[in-house]
Image: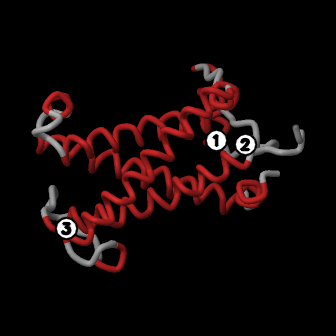
Amino acid sequence: MNRDLIYPAYVRLFHWINAVCVIGMCMSGWQVYNASPIFHAIRFAPAITLGGWLGGALLWHFAIMWVLVSNYLAWLAIGIATGRLRRTLFPLTVRALGADILAALRGQLAHDHLGRYNAVQKLAYLLVIADIALVVLSGLAVWKPVQLPLLSSLMGGFDNARVVHFAAMSGLVGFFVVHVTMVAIVPRSLLTMIRGR
């Protein structure tokens, strides 16, 4: 095992597939949303949508969905089986989280080793793991409300499932923006996610 390796090849592969899938899902989802907006004041510019029309957007959305779900489940399974998820995201304590949030607000949050996450990063990654699961589950409730009545009911019905799906997607976009901003602040993290070290 190479001790200099921060991110194994499978982690990097899953990361980049996830990134492309999330971008594609959002862009095609925005085109679907525009066809029947939940919030009439919110519309997405055609330049940032994918599919060109409702039918095309749905085709893209469903095609990318299978890749995203497969990639997510494989990453989760390997992360649990190898113990990597446990090692990188736990322990996470309230005390450490409070201290790191205060340090971040003061601009003093240390990030010396890219392979070791601080408490704020651990929480952010745990939340995005849960958020992706919520995006998928709420998307299934919207896509198949008759075939999955229990899931649809858990989401509060079809209309509420659409709101949950939109909110979960917004959370992913928020994470993406913060993630890219942090990469811009610490550019070596991008190289590490490409090279592994």
According to the image, label 1 marks what residue?
A: 104
Q: Amino acid at mark 1?
A: Ala
The answer to the question of whether label 2 and label 1 lie on touching residues, with beta carbons closer than 8 A, is yes
Q: Residue at x 63, y 55 (%)?
A: 182
Question: Which quadrant is home to the N terminus?
Answer: top right
> Image quarter for residue 135?
top left
Q: Residue 139: give x, y in percent of width and height.
A: 27, 46
Which secondary structure, mark 3?
Answer: helix
Name the one closer to the observer, 56 or 115.
56
Q: Amino acid at mark 3?
A: Asn
The answer to the question of whether label 3 and label 1 lie on touching residues, with beta carbons closer than 8 A, is no
Which secondary structure, mark 2?
Answer: loop
- The tag earlier along the polypeptide, 3 or 2, is 3
Q: Residue at x 33, y 72 (%)?
A: 50
According to the image, label 3 marks what residue?
A: 34
Q: Residue 27: give x, y in percent of width and height.
A: 36, 66
Of badges 3 and 1, nearer the viewer stands: 3
CA separation, marks 3 and 2?
42 Å
> Image quarter for residue 132?
top left
Name the one closer to the observer, 59 or 115.
59
* Residue 104 falls left or right of residue 64: right
Q: Amino acid at mark 2?
A: Gln
According to the image, label 2 marks what residue?
A: 108
Label 1 CA crowd tier, 10 Å (few <14, some 14–19, many 20+): few
Q: From the viewer's perspective, is residue 76 above or below residue 94? A: below
Q: Residue 167: give x, y in percent of width and height.
A: 29, 47
Q: Residue at x 66, y 58 (%)?
A: 183
Of badges 3 and 2, nearer the viewer stands: 3
